[in-house]
Image: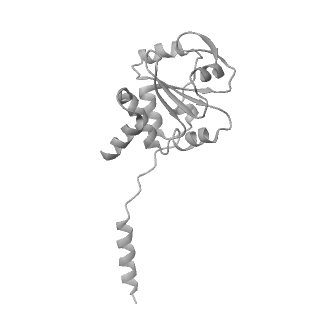
Amino acid sequence: MKTPMGWLALALTLTLAVPLQPALAEARDPMSHFFMSKMGDFKEELATAKQEGKAGVLIMFEMEECPFCARMKGTVLNQSEVQDWFRKHFLIYTVDVKGGTDMTDFQGNATTEKAFALANRARATPTFLFFDLEGRLVTRFTGATQTPEEFLLLGRYVVEGAYKTQPFNIYKHQASKR
């Protein structure tokens, strides 16, 4: 049987053997810290993105009561590190796939949110579409990412231009080996 000092030594050893978990990033409201207020004119938003030196425009297609959209907002898009990184590189907006709000697409055509979503084949939610500074779709990601780190990797995939030479799953696999 161990002595009280032996138990204390064992507990201390086990405590030191367990790696400390990194502190979680600050959680902030994604509607005010991740997404930007949209003017409803994506052609104008492109001009703003160019002016501000952004890599492009990111649109999250969503709908009310989408559990995967809520999960993304509550576990990934609410993280300050994710918010700060994406806002540095993109203008970021939401589009309601069932919305009837009038808007202007990247080519300057009048449309509605629902019609814009259909034109961009955003049927499942969430769907994240990355557009370059000319309004061309460069990357599509459908569904929720598993972690904030995976979502940041998706952003880097676009910013680094890796989408031009390989699919995201290969980029992600190669990144895991680094």
Provide residue 62's location: percent of width, then percent of height. 61, 32
Q: Residue at x 57, y 37 (%)?
A: 29
Quarter containing the C terminus: top left
Q: Quadrant of the N terminus?
A: bottom left
* Lateral position of residue 63 relative to residue 12, left or right: right
Residue 1, placed above or below residue 75: below
Left or right of 158, for residue 79: right
In-image side of 4 versus 115 (left or right): left
Q: Position of residue 94 (x, y in %)?
A: 58, 27
Q: Position of residue 150 (x, y in %)?
A: 44, 41
Identify whether 39 is placed above or below 170: above
Name the residue furthest left.
Answer: 178
The quadrant in which residue 36 appears is top right
The front one of 146 and 45 is: 146
Q: Residue 111, position in %: x, y? A: 63, 14
Q: Nearer the viewer, residue 94 or 119?
A: 119
Question: Which residue is drawn at the image coordinates 43% and 35% (left, top)?
Answer: 154
- Residue at 52%, 12% in the rendered image: 44
Q: Check the image and report above or below for 107 versus 5.
A: above
Color scheme of the displayed model: one colour
In this rendering, the answer to whether 121 lies above or below 150 is above
Label total for image: 0
Residue shown at 58% from the left, 10% from the top? 109
Q: Residue furthest bottom?
A: 1
